Image (cartoon, rainbow, N blue to C red):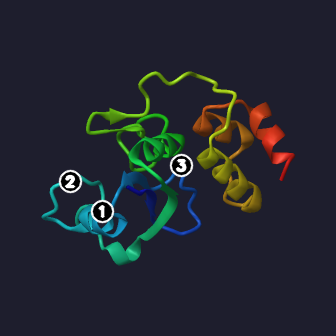
Amino acid sequence: MAHYIYSIRKNATDCPLTQGYVGCTNNASKRHHEHFHRNAGNPSPLRGENKDEWFFEVLAVCEDKTNALQVEYFYRPTPNIGLNVRAGGSHGGNTWLKGRKSNNPTISVEAKEFIEWWYNNPSLAPTLTEQAVALDCSVSTISKYRSTL
């Protein structure tokens, strides 16, 4: 089942790596509504805000929850980034973080998509060092891949 990585930020020009909220869901429109609706069951820092004043964007579509959690982790590798209070990559006991190796020299398909998007949108891209932290790889790995674009 497809899963979506989405961002909710105050402005479309805000960087989703550092600002706003990033989440993972299998139903983007329902989850968008839940973030702003006062009676929705899931907690949200946006509860009670006017959703028309916030920018909602699907950042990635993944083939399954495991891949989606990996991409979510790229955006939120630690707690307290933007409006997120928890690190990405773990939902309801299904975690991509189990057994993860640090400084993985390979780049996933999703990570390549991020690098390409940042390469084509330099004004919204984080520094190479920030990209390396978010994607859990080295700056040289990113630079090598960028040189092929």
The percent position of residue 10, horizontal first and vertical second, equals: 46, 66
Residue at (43, 42) in percent of width and height: 69
Sequence-earlier tag: 2 or 1: 1
Residue matched to label 2: 42
The percent position of residue 99, horizontal first and vertical second, equals: 46, 21
Sequence-earlier tag: 3 or 1: 3
Q: Quadrant of residue 33?
A: bottom left
Q: CA distance from mark 3 to mark 1?
A: 21 Å
- Amino acid type at mark 2: Asn
- Amino acid type at mark 1: Arg
Residue at (44, 59) in percent of width and height: 6
Q: How many marks?
A: 3
Tell me the crowding category of disc 2: few under 14, some 14 to 19, or many 20 or more residues within 10 angstroms, Cα based.
few
Residue at (53, 55) in percent of width and height: 16
In the drawing, does residue 26 fall left or right of residue 131?
left
Tell me the crowding category of disc 3: few under 14, some 14 to 19, or many 20 or more residues within 10 angstroms, Cα based.
some
- Amino acid type at mark 3: Thr
Mark 3 or mark 1, which is nearer to you?
A: 1
Sequence-earlier tag: 3 or 2: 3
Asked whether disc 3 touches disc 1, contact meaning CB atoms under 8 Å apart, the reply is no
Q: Is residue 55 above or below residue 87?
A: below
Circle number at residue 123: none
Q: Quadrant of residue 31?
A: bottom left
The percent position of residue 59, horizontal first and vertical second, equals: 52, 60
Residue matched to label 1: 31
Circle number at residue 18: 3
Q: Is residue 12 above or below residue 124?
A: below
Tell me the crowding category of disc 1: few under 14, some 14 to 19, or many 20 or more residues within 10 angstroms, Cα based.
some
Asked whether disc 2 touches disc 1, contact meaning CB atoms under 8 Å apart, the reply is yes
Q: Secondary structure at mark 1?
A: helix
Q: Secondary structure at mark 3?
A: loop
